[in-house]
Structure formats: C-alpha cells, structure tokens
Image: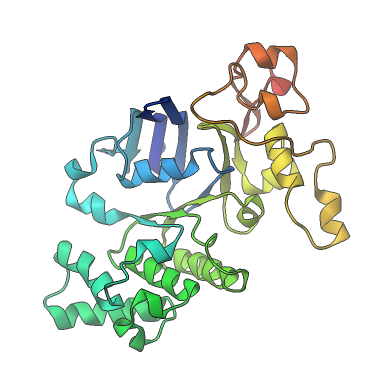
Amino acid sequence: MKTDDILTVDSLKKHFIIPQGTVKAVNGISFSVKKGETLGIVGESGSGKSTVAYVLAGIYNATEGKIIYKGKHDLTKSFKKRPIELKRDIQIVFQDPGSSLNPAFTVKNILENPLKFHKIGKDSNDREDKIIEWLKTVELSVDYIYKYPWEMGGGEKQMVAIARSLLLEPSLILLDEPTSALDVSVQAKVINKIINLQKELNLTYIFITHDLSLMRNVASRIIIMYLGTILEAAKSSDFFDNPLHPYTRMLISSVMVITDEEEKLKPKDVTSIGEIPSSLNIPKGCPFYERCSKRMEICLREDPSFVEVTKGHIVRCHLFRE
C-alpha cells in the first residue's frame, strides 16, 4: 500500500445467494483511493457500483477479498466489529434523500442522533449549536432545524443528508449517486457544494454514478464497472481524451451534448447495443462480449486480463493484449 493511499481494495467479491442461484454483484475488483482525491466509479444499473459502496460502508459484509483503511484497519470484518472511530470516519450519502431521512423526525432529531450515539457534545444545547453550524455550512438557514423532510424539496433534503455525513468529521465519504434523484435545476448546486466542501475540509470521496459526463469536472480518477468487474481505470482527463475499452467508448458516445463541437468529440466507431446481462448468468469469456462491436473469437473463450497502456491507464480488453 502506498503511503498516500487512504483505502486499498484487493480482490473484493460480494455474492448474494437467492433461490434462482448466486448473484455475483461484485466479482473480484481491486483499486486504491488516494487521500484528498475523488475516485469516480461509473457503470450502468446492475454493474455492482452501489454494492461496492455498501460493502465499504459496512452495510454488506464482503464475501471475499480485503479492504484496508489507512494502511492498518481491516474493513472486511462485520460493521459491528469495526472500531467506533472507523464508524465515524467513513460516512455515506445515499441516492434518495427522501428514503434516507426519517419522515417522522425533524432535522434536529436526524442530525442529533449520530452525535448522541458517538457521545459528541456536552449537552443538548451544545449539540444544537453544532447542528446549526453544519446547516450553515451546507447553506441552509437556522429555521430548517425544526422542519420535517416532507416539508423540504429534494435538494434541501440532500443538503441535510450531506450535513449528517459531515458532522462526525469523517475522512472518507461515499457518495452513492447523490444527485440522480434530484431535479436538474438543483443538481448543479448540490455538486458545487460537494466540490467546495471537499476543498474546505480536505475530504476524500468515492463518487458512484451512472453519468460518465458528470465525472469530467468532479473526479480525479475514474473506474468503469461492468457486471461486477472493472473494465478500465485511468485519470479523468485520459478517459475523455483517449477512451480505450469499447464499453467506455459506448458510454461516452451515449452522453447527451448541446453543441456541435461537443458532438465531434464523441467516439464514432461504437454504438450502444443491448442491455447489461443479469449478474445471475455472467457470460463466459469477456463479460462485455454480447454487446461489443469489436468482439473477436478469443473474446468468447477467454476473459481478458488488465493491460497498462500508458502510466496509470489500464484496460481489460483483448484489443490491447501485449
């Protein structure tokens, strides 16, 4: 593990046993996250990206693999066995604030409960002062402390959820599609606040999303997931300047653009074909074979291994075999 890595994930698997068989939601992925960076994990629904976040947060236990935090803490153990300081130090913001905030609680109740659990604050007044401070940090006025979630808009609810993740002063925050449930008009406001807070508080983010275009201005590095595996990983700029895997090129070609100049930058040699298969029945060979316009006979027989095409830019595709 490098000294600047805050998190190292090695051969992580998360499988679910159901009556129909085994769902291989995450099927052996490895990556690291540097302190202070934003790692984007991108993929379609069913790719396993949110499952990765839930395992890291301790909501699910890993089936196999290793998760090492800050070089010494093993997060593959159950959440109950994690030291209390780790439960504070890693927080998650869920996709839908409407379901992640208890509608029967006021904002004060929602934000005070984790403070009580972690024994932060001398008394109720001290905790209330901390809550007001964090509401101001996410640009919500003091009167929100008495509101219920159902009295607020989607953007306001997500700001409360972000404040809840911050008030324990964590080092790593998992953002599970934090804007996908919001109106377009408020998405930019939430994203800008997330970016500014990272700079102000020296936070590390893992940003889960299906929107590759969003990562251009948010992530420092990007991982592309498909059927529980990683197909490509690189610096954010490399993905848009030189996307390699046919799946990555397909995702970029599907991005909605406004100007003719933006349209010219999209790959022209790939088209979007079909939908992601079920994790219950992962194809043999390359998992992307059925949808790939560049497929070869070897792709059906052999699952490709990773090739480092340029420094830090790896791709799992037979087109780039050494």
For this rendering, which residue is in front, 100 or 34?
100
The image quarter containing residue 55 is top left
Q: Is 138 left, or right, of 122 in this rendering?
A: right
Q: How many marks?
A: 0
Report if residue 197 is visible in the image.
yes
Q: How is the image coloured?
A: rainbow
Residue 267 picture location, percent across and down = 81, 42
Residue pictured at 49% horizontal, 38% vertical = 48
Q: Which quadrant does the C terminus fall into?
A: top right
Residue pictured at 55% horizontal, 43% vertical = 45
Residue pictured at 65% horizontal, 27% vertical = 288
Residue 68 picture location, percent across and down = 33, 37
Residue 132 picture location, percent across and down = 30, 82
Residue 140 picture location, percent across and down = 41, 82
Q: Which quadrant does the N terminus fall into?
A: top left
Residue found at the very far front of the displayed protein: 19
Residue pictured at 33% horizontal, 28% vertical = 63
For this rendering, which residue is in front, 146 or 304?
146
For this rendering, which residue is in front, 248 or 45?
45
Residue found at the very far left of the displayed protein: 123
The image quarter containing residue 187 is bottom right
For this rendering, which residue is in front, 21 or 170?
21
